[in-house]
Amino acid sequence: MSTPSALRVLVAEDDVPTRIGIRTILDAEPDIAVVAEAENGIDACRLAAESAPDVVLMDVQMPQLDGISATRRITEEARHEARPRVIVLTTFDYDEYVYGALRAGASGFLLKRTPAEELVDAVRVVANGEALLSPELTRRLIAGFSRRDESERSTVLDSLTDREREVLLLIARGLSNREIARWLMVSVETVKTHAKRIFMKLGVRDRAQAVVIAYESGLVVPSS
């Protein structure tokens, strides 16, 4: 049985057996509660507004409105303080899905074949404000962005201090706040303060969006 403070999850998946399977996995956790289910992108947007979930699990290939478009609508239309975090689910980890999902405002990306325990952990990680990208996907995205022409790269990082750039680089490489603190030999609270300032200066809401900017700006390259 879930607790009153349980993480609220909306499952948006048009395949009924898959949706039931995801709900069964999540509802077995005492700190997670599935509060709504959607079978198409339009319903996902409506239910996200009505049920105020903390996390949305969004199938990328949804009828009526695809998952990436639905993700963009949900993250843009929700009030900032009540904006849910979205994990995009798909059968295949195509790079265009990953990049499109992150650009649309998703905080994470998972394959549907992800083991149950990893799915549960993913919900908790994203609800806690962390980005969710596997090292393999991160390496591929870095390699792809590094092939961009230098003239295409943004100067959006000009407002960051040297230390903030260093922290952003480590975030983009997939390190947690605790790992960054050990790497820089500072406290976790100091890392959190740097991260908040980075997000504010870049105009992003979480680590996933900061990672996109790190790639697009050319801060992250394979040799880093």
Image: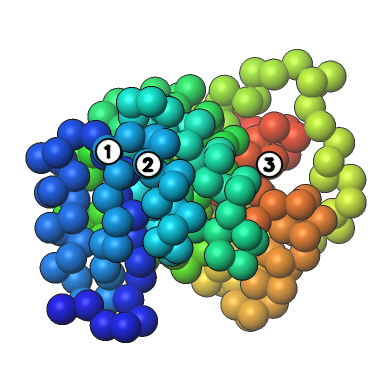
Secondary structure under the numbered disc 3 in the rendered image = helix
Rounded to the nearest angstrom, the CA distance separating label 2 from label 3 is 33 Å
Q: Position of residue 139 (x, y in %)?
A: 49, 34
Q: Are marks 2 and 1 in contact (CB under 8 Å)?
A: yes
Q: Which residue is mark 2?
A: 43
Q: Which residue is depicted at the point 82% across and 56% down?
A: 201
Q: Position of residue 135 (x, y in %)?
A: 42, 43
Q: Which mark is residue 39?
A: 1
Q: Nearer the viewer, residue 37 or 172?
A: 37
Whether residue 37 is situated above or below residue 179 in the rendered picture: above
Name the amino acid type tagged 3. Ala
Secondary structure under the numbered disc 2 in the rendered image = helix
Q: Residue furthest right?
A: 159
Q: Nearer the viewer, residue 96 or 184?
A: 96
Rounded to the nearest angstrom, the CA distance separating label 2 from label 1 is 7 Å
Name the amino acid type tagged 2. Asp
Secondary structure under the numbered disc 1 in the rendered image = loop
Mark 2 or mark 3: whose residue is earlier in sequence: 2
10 Å crowding of disc 1: few (<14), some (14-19), many (20+) = some
> Which quadrant, please, contains the C terminus?
top right
Q: Quadrant of residue 181?
A: bottom right
Whether residue 96 is situated above or below residue 14 in the rendered picture: above
Q: Nearer the viewer, residue 182 or 63?
A: 63
| Drawn side of residue 14 relative to residue 162, left or right | left
Q: Is residue 98 visible?
A: no
Whether residue 163 is situated above or below residue 178 in the rendered picture: above
